[in-house]
Image: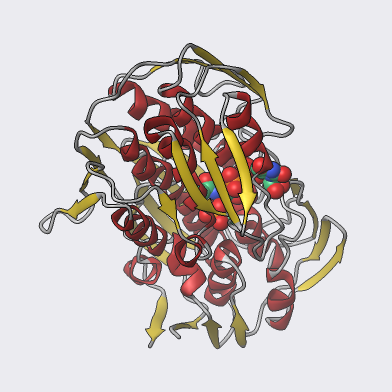
């Protein structure tokens, strides 16, 4: 199993290119199922979850070709399909596999998708996806660990989800594009990946309004056609590099990073004392010495993202003062705390709240990554710690970051992958 060896204490300096967003790429790859015509995606990040999604789609008969000269361009053709099934072996490694459910059901009238099951950060049920599709007339049973769904043609409906769900909104949005009549999604997620998906679907002939707001209206059409779409830059990857520079010191230019998608994170970084500036083509970040401790609460976009909680906590670990961090989205998303403590951090957890008392220095040790963003948090901690930090189980990191250690090395970090 690969590990990362980090020799901490070096400031970061230089330019880094932000890749396409994992959380936009995954639904957008699945959206290719909605049409028999070729769909080309540009700016596809090179990460494990994309590989798993391509495997899942190919397993159904989709042809998916990466352009050799430009590996960030993938063309998919979902015709003919040999099966409408997403097997457990593939779904278990990536919860976002549930995103094939809506498109399969909408275009083919049937789908058999393994239940994703629990994962490190919480139980993560998909009841809202199922409830929404049932409201659109689907006949759904859960048997032998699979969601088995059938519908002659989905019918438009008004759907109010019990909570804001990102992939739930995406699944229902994709399904509604081919349904008969109008669908109104109330309490829809507003994360930037949703309008990006909606723009892609519109370019395929879908009729969608209100994406990026709490209410999305979709007029179903008979069929969708092929398209070429460029995936939005990854705001969480950008946020991770912003935190890394603010914690480790130095300054960097993040090419393609978008300030308008990172409002809450940038506000908190400024509160911590870093300078973050929107410049032509990206973001510039500069550390102004030891950060100040900053408290925050995770919530739905546009509030502070849960996917940045662990990385910002690493910054708070070496900040001046104490911070209180509340996690409101996932019930078990403090798995990084015990590992940060192994590096010398002072953190107490009570339920959904962590109190961090900043220390002047962390000290390198061997730590174990437990989930994707926890891994990124340990890498940031390793960059600021004295001596050597070994981060084990980085397959979690590889799931969602495009060549992170190479990008950090480009900024001057002393970090290497141990095979
Ligand atoms: C591939 C992708 O885009 N993943 C993101 C997506 O995950 P994902 O879409 O899985 O997260 P959701 O927005 O659905 O989850 C929000 C909350 O709703 C709950 N819930 C959700 C659906 C459901 O049917 N029932 C239910 O109870 C979840 O357990 C969680 O507590 O949004 C999360 C929240 O911003 C991010 O951390 C993930 O990076
Ligand atoms: C939790 C995450 O992803 P996923 O929903 O794919 O598990 C994440 O990107 O931080």
Q: Nearer the viewer, residue 224 or 70?
A: 224
Quadrant assignment, res 32: top left
Pinpoint residue 21: horizontal percent, then vertical percent.
41, 47
Residue 367 seen in the current view: yes
**On-image quarter of the N terminus:** bottom left
Q: Nearer the viewer, residue 246 or 389?
A: 389
User: Is 247 located above or below residue 305 in the figure?
Assistant: below
Quadrant assignment, res 107: top left
- Residue at 39%, 82% (x, y): give it: 417
**Relative to 193, is 165 on the left or the right?**
right
Quadrant assignment, res 415: bottom left
Q: Nearer the viewer, residue 315 or 221?
A: 221
Q: How is the image coloured?
A: secondary structure
Pinpoint residue 133: horizontal percent, then vertical percent.
58, 31
Residue 273 seen in the current view: no
**On-image quarter of the C terminus:** bottom left
User: Is 117 located above or below residue 205 in the figure?
Assistant: below
Pinpoint residue 272: horizontal percent, then vertical percent.
66, 51
How many numbered marks appear?
A: 0
Ligand 2 lies in quarter: bottom right
Q: Nearer the viewer, residue 188 or 391?
A: 188
| Extreme residue toward the left, this view | 69
- Residue at 59%, 17% (x, y): give it: 157
User: Is 79 located above or below residue 57 in the figure?
Assistant: above
**Relative to 285, is 380 on the left or the right?**
right
- Residue at 49%, 76% (x, y): give it: 394
**Relative to 280, is 93 on the left or the right?**
right
User: Is 33 located above or below residue 172 in the figure?
Assistant: below
Pinpoint residue 40: horizontal percent, then vertical percent.
21, 40
- Residue at 22%, 52% (x, y): give it: 64
């Amino acid at each position: 199993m690969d590990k990362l060896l980090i020799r901490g204490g070096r400031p970061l300096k230089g330019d880094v290119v932000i890749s396409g967003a994992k959380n936009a790429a995954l639904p957008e790859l699945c959206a290719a199922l909605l049409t028999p015509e070729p769909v080309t995606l540009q700016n596809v990040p090179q990460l494990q979850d994309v590989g798993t999604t391509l495997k899942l789609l190919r397993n159904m008969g989709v042809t998916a070709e990466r352009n050799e000269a430009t590996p960030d361009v993938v063309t998919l053709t979902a015709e003919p399909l040999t099966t409408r099934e997403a097997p457990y072996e593939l779904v278990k490694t990536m919860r976002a596999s549930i995103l094939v459910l809506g498109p399969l059901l909408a275009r083919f009238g049937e789908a058999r998708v393994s239940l994703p099951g629990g994962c490190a950060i919480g139980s993560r049920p998909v009841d809202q996806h199922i409830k929404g599709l049932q409201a659109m007339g689907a006949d759904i049973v859960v048997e032998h660990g699979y969601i088995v769904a059938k519908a002659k043609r989905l019918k438009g409906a008004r759907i109010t989800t019990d909570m804001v769900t990102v992939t739930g909104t995406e699944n229902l949005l994709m399904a509604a594009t081919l349904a008969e009549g109008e669908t109104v999604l109330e309490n829809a997620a507003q994360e930037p990946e949703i309008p990006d998906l909606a723009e892609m679907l519109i370019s395929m002939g879908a009729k969608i309004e209100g994406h990026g707001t709490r209410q999305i209206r979709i007029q179903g059409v008979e069929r969708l056609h092929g398209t070429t779409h460029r995936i939005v830059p990854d705001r969480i990857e950008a946020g991770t590099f912003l935190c890394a520079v603010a914690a480790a010191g130095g300054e960097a230019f993040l090419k393609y990073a978008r300030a308008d998608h990172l409002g809450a994170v940038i506000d908190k970084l400024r509160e911590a004392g870093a300078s973050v500036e929107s410049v032509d083509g990206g973001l510039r970040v500069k550390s102004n010495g030891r950060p100040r401790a900053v408290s925050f609460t995770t919530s739905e976009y546009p509030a502070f993202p849960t996917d940045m909680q662990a990385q910002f906590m690493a910054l708070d670990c070496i900040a001046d003062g104490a911070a209180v961090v509340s996690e409101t989205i996932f019930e078990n998303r403090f798995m990084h705390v015990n590992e940060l403590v192994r590096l010398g951090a002072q953190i107490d957890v009570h339920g959904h709240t962590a109190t961090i008392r900043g220390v002047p220095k962390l000290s390198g040790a061997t730590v174990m990554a437990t989930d994707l963003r926890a891994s990124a948090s340990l890498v940031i901690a390793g960059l600021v710690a004295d001596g050597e930090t070994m981060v084990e189980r980085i397959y979690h990191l590889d799931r969602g970051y495009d060549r992170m250690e190479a990008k950090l090395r480009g900024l001057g970090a002393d970090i290497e992958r141990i095979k």
